[in-house]
Amino acid sequence: MESSLARKSDWELTAPAFERLLGLLDADRERAGEKYELARRRLLAFFEARGSESPADHADETINRAARKIAEGERVEDINKYLYGVARLLLLELGRAREKLPLPLDSVAPPGAPAAGEREEEERERAESERRFECFEDCLGKLAPDSRDFILSYYKEEKGEKIRGRKRQAGDLGVSLNALRLRASRIRSALERCMGECAGGGAAEK
Amino acid sequence: MESETDRDEQFTRYLLGDLPEEECARLEELYFDDDEAFESLLAARDELADLHARGELKGRRRERFEEHFLSTGPRRQRAREAKELVEFSTKAAAAEGENLAAGTRAAGSPWWASLPAALGRRSPALRYALAALLLCAALGGAWLLFKRGGDARPERAGGTPPATPDAVARRPADEETRPRPDGGQDEGAADAPAPPSASPTPGHTRAPETASNRRATPTSSSAPPTAGVASILLSPVLTRGGAGPSNTLLLRPETTTARLRLSFKGGGDYRRYVAVLRTIEGEQVWRGAATAAGAAGPGKTAVADIPARVFRKQDHTATLYGVTAAGETQEVGEYFFRVSRDQNQ
């Protein structure tokens, strides 16, 4: 719903415009593709952090607008800074559109609300969870063995505060806690992308 | 120059909506320009969601997470996925442990005893098919060789049980439901949010775990005192890791009311008490009065009766607030517990 609040451009991304955008990211086609993915992930993170209900739509709209401007002859020195500028403008538009809406109703269900279909819903959730776990296992299997062991050790539940376990893990690997955190985040990103492809995608795109 | 730690702290505050606009813009410029800074932002976001999923986010951080971070759909989804990652990793690690144990037990055993581990990284469908084939062969062989009726499963027939995939698949469930002398369960089984019922072998594709096969009998603290009422005595806990079997509330089909008995240290002069029930993701599902009951040891107990139908998820937190004569609300205690539904009674 929110994506329709901002004025969506009626312009469609053309192949030449996209090529020009890629050219600004890197002269090498393959590296440009990688940088494009990274730029899109930045936009997703930005819109998610700023409270967007449709980060993917807004990231794509930002890219479309930037590509259009570039195709129309806009001179861009730094494409990442430029994308950020376009994203901020879109965010302002979204904010203005949101201000015109009435306040949402309280999302808390009243205590007396009927529990129709509760069992079916639980069953469905359980089956979905089973399916996602199978995807998780398949995706784990695609990781390098050391990454796989690392991520299981990093995220599995254990007695006591996890932070202590992670300090121990960092000590065992001879790295700082921050390096441990970054490594976990990188592997987790790969795992989530694989999960998204396997299970039809959670909302948490990275 | 900003240190790595300061920057990470700023990213955390940014994600919690705790920074002024100029500072937000500065950080955004930074992570749009610098790959390492962007990685730090993602790591900070993962860590926040992870700490919340484990119940290890405290104080103002937790408040901000629940007020701000969980205020949008995509971020709530991220929080759900963080919780799922902990559950799945725990489950998979437990299954790995089983594999390892099976491998150790199978030392010197026939070649097929090591199959569960060998199949561990195949697709679930392939594992299931291969293991089913093996099971059929094992059962058929046993039948042809011994021509005995009744239970043809080799490990039940006495003697040393060979580690067939079937045996490995069944073992965790057997162990989980094995009662302890005190009526509780093995701590290892209770420690994991989703007990290691999913083995690395065909167990993954069998019927989903149910409340009845996970927990055969209610724990003493959740035995219903009257028909339709399930009661549980909770002590304030700070981490999910502290949730053992006695923190599981069993809801039977006939249960209409869940009675939470929340113990807390006396001392505060409160006129009344209010309990708030939330899912582990922080969504408030119920709020109502709690009645102070008789003293329990050195402390007190407040009782909140909650309609059973509001429990739609497995993991919950309850927060008890005291209201002073001046009308000020103070947090008295926070409690973590798990809900198990028994549908086969």
Image: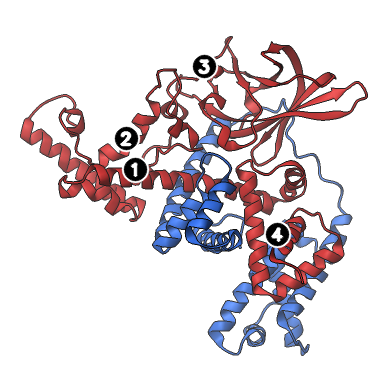
Chain of residue at mark 1: B
Q: Which mark is residue B98?
A: 1
Question: Could you tell me how far apart the alpha carbons at marks 2 and 4 are, in whole angstroms?
Answer: 45 Å
Chain of residue at mark 4: A
Residue B211 to residue A79: above or below: above
Estimate the x, y position of residue B114 in percent, counting from the top left.
Answer: 23, 49
Estimate the x, y position of residue B240 in percent, counting from the top left.
Answer: 59, 37
Task: Quadrant for residue A182, please give it.
Answer: bottom right
Dot 3 falls on a residue whose secondary structure is helix
Dot 4: few (<14), some (14–19), or many (≥20) neighbours within 10 Å? Answer: some
Q: Colour of chain A?
A: blue
Left-right relation of A198 to B204? right
Dot 1 falls on a residue whose secondary structure is helix
Q: Which chain is red?
A: B
First of labels 1, 2 by sequence position: 1
What residue appears at the point 53 percent right and 29 percent down from the top-left corner?
B244
- Foreground mark, 4 or 3? 3
Q: Which mark is residue B171?
A: 2
The lab-note entry on whether marks 4 and 1 share a chain reads no
Question: Could you tell me how far apart the alpha carbons at marks 4 and 3 are, in whole angstroms?
Answer: 47 Å
Instruction: Write down the residue under mark 4.
Output: A54
Estimate the x, y position of residue B282 in percent, counting from the top left.
Answer: 69, 40
Residue B67 to residue A193: above or below: above
Estimate the x, y position of residue B163 in percent, counting from the top left.
Answer: 23, 40
Task: Quadrant for residue A205, please give it.
Answer: bottom right
Left-right relation of B147 to B251? left
The answer to whether marks 1 and 3 mark residues whose Cβ atoms lie closer than 8 Å is no
Where the N terminus of chain A falls, by quadrant?
Answer: bottom right
Dot 1: few (<14), some (14–19), or many (≥20) neighbours within 10 Å? Answer: many
Instruction: Write down the residue under mark 3.
Output: B220
Q: Nearer the viewer, residue A53 or A82?
A: A82
